[in-house]
Amino acid sequence: MKTLLAMAVFFFPVVAGCQGTPSLDVLLDRLVAYANQYQATLPSLSCDEQITTQALNKKGKVTWDVKIQSTLREVRTEDPNDPFAERREFKSIDGHRPRRTFQTSQLPYFVEGGFAGLVIFKRWEQRECFDYAVAAGDGGHTVRLEMTLKPKSTNPACAKLPAGFHRIVIADPETGRILHTERTIAPEEAVRNTEVYFGGIDYAPQKLGEQTFWLPSRFYSHDAENTERMFATYSNCHRYVGELKILPGVSFPGEGQEHR
């Protein structure tokens, strides 16, 4: 089964944090500012990806388990609302080279967009659509933000958001740097739009050339009944230079290169 994930994923330069819990408006301003910085600065990149996808019975016992190794590429686009396209090259399925006929629909559960799926950042600005809860964590070194879609809003912009939308973000309170984010929507909404019911991401620093960015290090997703789930980890991320073409059908050196 393959589903799609539309959830905010942020990649931000490493910055030192400090203690203190900002007001809600200040915190949201910092998240939006870093989202804009991410869109402007992160280059195309390539990562090694390890995936485990499983089906479970009603008692929680794994009945089908598949392990995958792949190369994941996040390639910049010219679309300001969707600045990265996700491309994946499968290297092995349960230790064997994938068949030419292999499709992700043959797997127990597979999510596309877990690394680069982006909620339109205007959603962060639709502040009247949500109820918020902000709390300090880790002795004030982190802040926990919960966003819950208001069930009865008359704002047309709010009606475009998935029913049951709920997000949790763990961030640096001073800079807005994301450490963890997760998103849940209503089960019926997930089925109706073939979207992920739950998706969560942990972030860790990765060097890309001379710069260090906070990139997803682990992704986890499951369906509403937790009978299908997927884990993915990412490592060895580096800049990726895509195909360069000047004239139709004419390619030049440097095509498809990956740079450490």
Image (cartoon, helix red, strand yellow):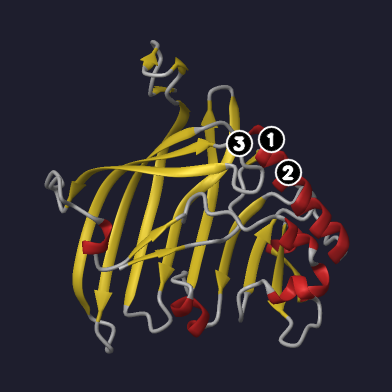
Q: Earlier in the sequence, mark 1 or mark 3?
A: 1
Q: Earlier in the sequence, mark 2 or mark 3?
A: 2
Quarter where residue 40 is shown: top right
Q: Do the numbered discs 1 and 3 sit on residues whose CB atoms are within 8 Å?
A: no
Q: Could you tell me if residue 133 is visible in this image?
A: no
Above/below status of 112 relative to 145: above
Q: Which one is closest to the eye, mark 2 or mark 3?
A: 3
Quarter where residue 146 is shown: bottom right
Q: Nearer the viewer, residue 85 or 134?
A: 85
- Tell me residue 126's x, y (percent): 79, 66
Report, in whole angstroms, how far the alpha carbon at label 2 lies from the one at label 1.
Answer: 6 Å
Identity of the residue furthest to the top in this view:
253
Q: Which mark is residue 40?
A: 1
At x 27% / y 89%, what residue is drawn?
59
At x 15% / y 45%, what residue is drawn?
100
Q: Which one is closest to the eye, mark 1 or mark 3?
A: 3
Q: Do the numbered discs 2 and 1 sit on residues whose CB atoms are within 8 Å?
A: yes
Q: Give the side of residue 114 with respect to residue 232, left or right.
A: right
Quarter where residue 167 is shown: bottom right
At x 41% / y 14%, what residue is drawn?
254
Q: Could you tell me if residue 57 is visible in this image?
A: yes
Q: Amino acid at mark 2?
A: Asn
Q: Secondary structure at mark 3?
A: loop
- Tell me residue 130's x, y (percent): 76, 75
At x 49% / y 62%, what residue is drawn?
5
Q: Give the side of residue 39 with respect to residue 210, left or right.
A: right
Classify the position of the N terminus by image quarter: bottom left
Q: Which mark is residue 36?
A: 2
Q: Amino acid at mark 3?
A: Glu
